[in-house]
Amino acid sequence: MAASPLAPLLRAAEPGLMDLINVHEFEDFAKVKMHKLAYDFIAGGVEDEQTLRANRAAFERHFLLPRVMVDVTTVDTSATLFGTKMNIPLVIAPTGGKNLVLPNADEVVAQGALATNTPICSAVGVRKILEEGKPLTWWTNTTGQRDKKQTIEYAKRTEDSGGKGIVVTCDNPYQSNRDRNNRNKFDYGYMQSGVPKEGENRPPRNPAKPAMYQPHTPNMTWEYIRWLRGACNLPVVAKGILAPEDAEMAIQNGASAVGVSNHGGRQLDGAIASLDALPDVVSVVKGRVPVFMDGGIRRGIDIVKAIALGADAVLVGRAPLWGLATFGQPGVERVLWMLGAEFKLAMSLAGVTNVAGIKKLKVRRISA
């Protein structure tokens, strides 16, 4: 924090919602406000955090060749996915542990998504909004069920509840080895209950420990995608794809879209950065299904770069949580507004008037 441009403001007085000028500053302020266990859980990656750093570094070595002398008086940032029109091609990614930030946080983030017309992918927190008949675009997220019967029940329940899609996290068969959590003596039970208050003594539920080898759904295979597609009429997104071969397998087994992702650097340390993996996946997919990408997005220009490299939309996970941690729902909305405003400005300065035009931009990867 000492080197942050926000540091003088934080020392002088607590900043207001409009004082923070980018997502990085929202994170700086969130770090000040949050309990260390909560901040490290959200901000951290696994082991040496190579992949976590690589996700951001990948954006810093990809450069655009903007076009000039283009009439950009009107710029259309909208995109349509699975029949739903979005203000910008951005979806709030599934993120666990929101209750570490504040109680009932999943619903608060969902309310922010509703207010900004942003699709959200979340396993929980949307029931009340949907029951009230509000136009929330909601995709559920799952790491899998134990067998075909449970999978079919899950798919039908999602469809009946008003879900618009199912996102399958394919890269999470076991709990990963997160040094920050291990060092902090984090308890994964806090993800539901929040961090204990000072002096509060709770019995341990699921304490973190090095290389704990805790299973999630280790028996999940491509057959699971086929089960889901056969059980409902919803699109099924295979998220967690880095290898082009897996992108092909996902499509062959009925996936409606492919999500290029390394879980935000939170599963296998040393995995390739999502942005670096994106072009090879896109070359295999060849437009047969949409391609999503997540990992390291903090600016509107990051979204432009991802689309220029072939993505149809991006998912953002940590950025809305920094807004949540600082100002609750208004913070979520402000972060999403910032990303959208930066995205539109970047499009204008790159000389493109719609999202389809971004894919015509040339990108150069410059090695250090």
Image: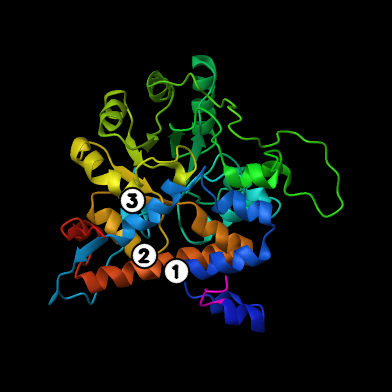
Name the chief secondary structure element in magenta: loop
In front of the other: label 3 or label 2?
2
Give residue 19's quadrant in the image: bottom right
Describe the element under mark 2 as helix, strand or loop.
helix
Badge 3 or badge 1: first in the primary sequence: 3
At label 3, the amino acid type is: Ala
| Left or right: 72, with 140 as reference point | left
Local packing at callout 3 (Cα closer than 10 Å; few below 14, some 14-19, many 20+) is many
> Is 2 colored magenta in this rendering?
yes
* Residue that mark 2 sits on: 300
* Residue that mark 3 sits on: 313
Determine the CA span between mark 3 and mark 2: 12 Å
Describe the element under mark 3 as helix, strand or loop.
strand
Q: Which residues are magenta?
A: 1-6
Describe the element under mark 1 as helix, strand or loop.
helix
Determine the CA span between mark 1 and mark 2: 8 Å
Image quadrant holding the C terminus, namely bottom left
Residue at the spot 61% in from the left edge and 52% down from the top edge? 40
Determine the CA span between mark 3 and mark 1: 17 Å
Q: Are marks 3 and 2 in contact (CB under 8 Å)?
A: no
Specify the label residue 338 is tagged with. Answer: 1
At label 2, the amino acid type is: Gly
> Is 314 colored magenta in this rendering?
no
Q: Are marks 1 and 2 in contact (CB under 8 Å)?
A: yes
Residue at the spot 67% in from the left edge and 60% down from the top edge? 34
| Left or right: 359, with 193 as reference point | left
Residue at the spot 57% in from the left edge and 41% down from the top edge? 178
